[in-house]
Image: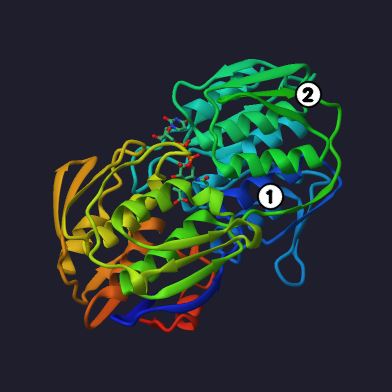
Amino acid sequence: MQKFVIIGGVPLSGQVRIAGAKNAVLKQMAAAVLTDDLCTLRNVPKISDVAILREVMGDIGFEVRRTNGDGLELRAREVTWPFVPLEAGMKMRASFILLGPMLARFGRLILPNPGGDRIGRRPVDYHVAAMEAMGATIEYRNGYYFASAPHDGLRGAHIEFPTITVMGTENAMMAATLARGTTVIDNAALEPEVDDLIAMLCGMGAQIQRTGERSIEVQGVERLHGTEHRVIGDRLEAETFAIAAAITRGDVTLTGIDPAHLGSFLQVCERMGVPYEVDPAAASVVIRGAASGELRPVDVRTDEYPGFATDFQAPLSVLMTQAVGASTIHETIFEDRLDHTRQLVKMGADIELLDNRRARITGPTPLHGAEVAIADLRAGATLVLAALVASGTSVISGIEHVDRGYEQIEAKLVALGAQINRIEA
Ligand code: EPU
């Protein structure tokens, strides 16, 4: 088991290149299933979720291979075994994204119920209902979904999601690209990662349009062809490094990120008094933590994009511990995503849980090093951030959760001056 040992209190400074977005690339790997031509992805992050999906797709029978640098080549010629093992499904819920493309192109897939994880129940009923609306049959037995498409393929349908779902939108959209007729998806997600998937699919010859603010129309086509696509920068990684600069009162330049994707986060920076500059032409943002005065408290409610991302409320809570006064977080997307607050309290934070969706964080409280354990990806980033500002040494276990979504986080932090080591323990 590996751990991070972090000695906090060093202001970070320098430049960091943001990797490709986890929540974009996983869907784009699945999109390659929709054609037997070669698809090439660029700016693919070196994270363990990509490695897991690569393995799953390899076991199904597809060729997936890293090329020099940040490329990934995928070719889905034929299926040897249309199966996703339980272990992969448990490790990575996003493996469910293979459902739509597999049904559309090969007509079948057996995949596990990803079940809950540490941020709440996370059902997949919307995905199942969308595929059924397109004519698929999905039976649930012994923890697995046995999904098959009709002999003459999926058909277009009107799908209206009861609440907004990112992967549900993406699964339905991919299934619809090869279905007969037109599919209309209402209450669709607006996340930049969804638009990046639309861009890739259109590059493969799909007919997809956003017809209203939350409506997507897909005109099914006979076949899709190969493409080369560059994955957008990871807004969550960018926001993590932005907080690292702000809490340590350092100046950090983030490159490889579209500042437009950080809108709601930068608004919070403004309200809290963290100076920054954006340069859309250069795809960069500079966080000027060294120039910030007293930080102001804020109240934040998570929401679907373009609202404040649920994935980012935990990391933001570290900055809130350094603001003068009481901040609140209201988590509206997931039912159980405040668990990290317990670990922050161990490091000296003053946090009161008002209920399982709301927390009050009163600052400023100096944080101190502690032995803490990571329970999920974003909680992991949160504890790393807390350790960077804490006095003394922190030892963080469970860092495999961080490796799921952050490419070489410690190397990037060391390059900015942080004292962080990965040790075998
Ligand atoms: N939901 C259902 N039924 C479904 C699907 C979703 O009830 O069939 C509910 C969920 O339980 C949740 C809400 O709908 O309450 C929204 O979930 P959504 O489907 O949008 O989440 P997701 O697509 O599974 C993606 C990201 C998450 C991110 C959420 C919300 C990927 C691979 N994951 O998950 O990212 O938190 O959208 O923005 O794209 C992360 O990166 O750390 C992460 C968890």
Q: What is the x, y in percent for residue 165? A: 49, 32
The residue under label 1 is which amino acid type? Met
Q: Is mark 1 within 8 Å of ligand 1?
A: no
The residue under label 2 is which amino acid type? Gly
In the displayed structure, does residue 322 sit left or right of residue 250? left
Res. 376 visible in picture? no
Residue under the image location 28 percent in, 61 percent down: 319
- Which image quarter holds the N terminus? bottom left
Q: Earlier in the sequence, mark 2 or mark 1?
A: 1
Q: Is residue 141 above or below residue 94?
A: above
Residue under the image location 51 percent in, 54 percent down: 235
Res. 229 visible in picture? yes
Q: What is the x, y in percent for residue 249? A: 33, 74
- Residues 60 and 170: in front is 170
**What secondary structure is found at the residue carrying circle 1?**
helix
Where does label 1 land, which residue?
Answer: 29
The Cα atoms of the two marked residues, 2 and 1, are separated by: 20 Å
Q: Is residue 30 above or below residue 128?
A: below
**What secondary structure is found at the residue carrying circle 2?**
loop
- Which image quarter holds the C terminus? bottom left
In the displayed structure, does residue 110 sit left or right of residue 107? left
Where does label 2 land, which residue?
Answer: 220
Q: Is residue 345 above or below residue 217?
A: below
